[in-house]
Amino acid sequence: MSDFLLLAFLFLVAGVAAVPIASRLGLGSVLGYLIAGIILSPMLAVLNVDVVSIQHFAEFGVVMMLFLVGLELEPKMLWAMRNRLLGLGGLQVGGTTALIAGVVWWFGADWRIALACGLILAMSSTAIVLQTLNEKGLMKGDGGQASFSVLLFQDIAVIPILALVPLLAMPGAHHGGGDEGHGASLSLVAGLSGWQTTLVTAGAIALVIAGGMFLTRPVFRYIAQARLREIFVATALMFVVGIALLMTLVGLSPALGTFLAGVVLANSEYRHELESDIDPFRGLLLGLFFMTVGAAIDFGLLFGDFAVIIGMTVGVMLAKALVLLIAARVFGLRGSEKFLFGLGLAQAGEFGFVLTSFAVANAVLPDDLAPRIMLVITLSMMLTPALFILYDRVIRPRYDREEPRDADEITEPGIAIVAGHGRFGGVVNRMLLAAGYETTVLDYSAAHLDMLRSFGVRGFYGDATRPDLLHAAGIDEAKLLIIAIDDKDQATELAHYVHHNHPHIHIIARARDRRHVYQLFAAGCRDIIRETFDSSVRAGRSAYEALGMHPFEAERLARAFVKEDRHALYELAQLWDPAVPDHINEPYRLKARELMTDADLRARGGAFRERSARGWVPPTEQDQAESSARDEAPEGP
Amino acid sequence: MSRVLHYAAHPGLSTSRINKAMVQQARAVSGITTLDLYEEYPRYDIDIEDEQQRLLEHDVIVLQFPLFWYSCPALVKEWLDLSWEHGFAYGHNGDKLAGKRLMLAITTGSPQDAYRPQGYQHHEIRQFLLPFEQTAHLCQMRFVTPYVLHGALHADPLAHAQGFARLLEALRDDRLDLDRAQELTILTHDTLPIVEV
Ligand SMILES: Cc1cc2nc3c(=O)[nH]c(=O)nc-3n(C[C@H](O)[C@H](O)[C@H](O)COP(=O)(O)O)c2cc1C
């Protein structure tokens, strides 16, 4: 137990200390984690920690990341990507394998070893690349999309490669047992013939897709109705882990399986909630993974063979970049996007680790070469953040200057987020949709959302007061937030949070009553609508009319009343202080007395009558007499 | 230097060609107050107090609108009815606008030929604008020859709108020759009597 706590504490301290510094220096979180890992490595060595097994555990972060990526990618988009996925991906994997294998062979290695090296090093690091692209907001661009296509292709390619590697075994070499612990010890396909395996595998994929389409929604709705947040998180985790397990059992990549599940769920109303539930786990696990990469560097080997190792690393990265740039050219990537793609994917990746140990286990690679390859992979991963910095600081500015403004002018259509889709928010949402604006609805009632979705409204399940959910719903790009949730305090809290963290957003908030108006005002909101005020005023106006007042007079009086009332409310809102109880808040009390006592109300009734009496008033007889006596402009119009 | 208050009033700006272009050009003119009356009062509840204050703070009032039924759009009339009160604009003690200038900038659907005794509108355009002219006189203001675009449905918005911006600048800098303007019945973008300095 204490071992576990100590280890957890060490990793947490290292991450917490290194990552903010790295981010602040503009190096990105990945480099921060890697450095933290390097700093940790002597301590881990003293404690005799098996870094590699922690790394296998942490690799689950990659699985989660692909699930999240899948959530962002609707099936349509995936289909639209198919050419790039196969073309770019195939070109990259095939080209890189051939080039590297060729060079290794030319250096005199056996062709089987050369081919294995090529395959291992052709893989890139999904973890580093996706994390960095997301962090820098480059994922949506052309280069980001192309990179993602290639990474996804590699994910798929691992499966046939794992099948191919044992065939490359050196003749006469003995077969090392197992595959060193990763991959499943259980298997659903062991001992099955080819077509049976195919059948089981296809069945598993179909299960994931069908489950995602038909099973998740009722389950999530059932869980959502219980309104237990941690159970929702547990359910989300259960799905991801379950799918990963199933995929491993049939010998597929778990990342690929969860990615598919993510795509299937991309249209679901639970998407944003799932995203914000899984994301923290992904972040922590990936962080751990990067630290283990840093910690696993074998410095003895590195310094013992410095020139050769560095030479190999640079050579590998150059070869990969070369193939990538050619592929980018073939597929028409332009400007700086081409270089983002070329530099971003030039490292070797975590799949390389898996393939290397698998190759050793299958007696494909000689024992002395494998650690070197591992080291080359690690070093190339370490260098990747530097390449991203190079891209950010040197390459992109150059292209930005060449194509001025273009990038600026693509403004995303401003969307409105409607928090709470009850009787109030529902009307607002309908009006927005009717006028052709795009809205995102957040609501905590699953039943409600189902109904909405049947009308084609973009609705998502979740608690709108949670920052991560707001983020997932696109608060960063939104122009407008409508706060129409029932709970007063939560509404105020939400207004406060958004006002302070996203000052660019216009907030329209529903107030339940006067006090709530003050609270929202204090939270920084300036567009506050009292939920029953307008209808009450209309009732008052109807009362005037029923008592015989001329309808236009009634209208004018009602308007004057509204104006006075809003004025009074505004004055009081400025004096109100959430920290001071009303009965001690002297200025507020005085003002309220001045404005609100019954007697004053009547007197003020006089004031608003007076105000409403102004307008369309002809001069009196006396006025006319006076002006003609003085011979000013005599008559008036 | 004069303080210019420019009100544009068009209830259907989204389908407007000319008035919209004029507003765009006017917004680019610095040192004047330019307002869209329908944006100020989308619900017609004109604030008399605010409006009178604004009138007091300016020397030249320019009302820009499309001609609707030989007159102004309804909100302009409402604005006049409410804020040009007795005791403020006219009548006993009603001299607050005295000495200021009132100018119209209007667009008409019918071509210039129509606004002739022989044309199908039968009267000169200035005759239709007499109520505004007399309003100015009653309030002891100077009525400046209006800036007019006839045949607005087919005319080139840009030339007229750019002319309007030059006009506003000239009013601001006191470079519009009011006497020469008075000799003309209407001003157009190519007949602006602007004094070059
Ligand atoms: C309700 C209405 C009444 C109109 N009355 C007249 C009119 O009396 N005389 C005239 O010449 N044009 C009349 N028009 C045409 C408008 O003056 C013309 O559409 C406008 O000046 C075009 O300017 P815009 O491009 O800014 O909309 C009328 C238009 C409308 C909609």
Image: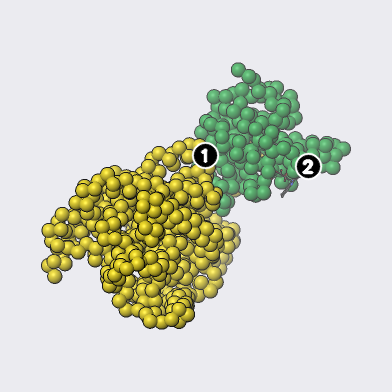
The location of residue A380, given as percent across then percent down, is: 33, 51
Q: Is residue A152 above or below residue B191?
A: below
Q: Please name the residue shown 25% across and 46% down the image.
A: A306
Residue A613 vertical position relative to residue A213 in the rendered view, above or below: above
| Chain B colour in the picture | green
Residue at (53%, 62%) from the top-left corner? A82
Can the viewer see residue A608? no
Residue at point 46%, 62% (across, down): A153
The chain containing the residue under callout 2 comes to B
User: In terms of secondary structure, where does tag 1 sit?
Assistant: loop
Foreground tag (2 vs 1): 1
At label 1, counting other C-alpha atoms closer than 10 Å, the crowd grade (few under 14, some 14-19, many 20 or more) is few
Residue A515: give x, y in percent of width and height.
34, 61
Q: Position of residue A567 (x, y in %)?
A: 42, 52
Q: Which residue is mark 1?
A: A403
Mark 2 residue CB less than 8 A from any atom of ligand 1: yes
Image quadrant of ligand 1? top right
Which mark is drawn over residue A593?
none
- The quarter of the image holding the N terminus of chain A is bottom left
Which chain is represented by yellow in the image?
Answer: A
- Circle 2 packing at 10 Å, graded few (<14), some (14-19), many (20+), is some
Where's residue A223, x and y in %? 37, 78
Q: Is residue B185 left or right of residue A146?
A: right
Residue identifier under label 2: B110
Picture quadrant where residue B164 is located: top right
Q: Amino acid at mark 1?
A: Glu
- Nearer to us in this view, A565 or B40: B40
Of residues A148 and B125, which is closer to you in this image? A148
Mark 2: which amino acid?
Ser
* Residue B135 against residue A417 in the figure, above or below: above
Work out how far the residue at label 2 is from the one at label 1, CA to CA, in angstroms. Answer: 47 Å
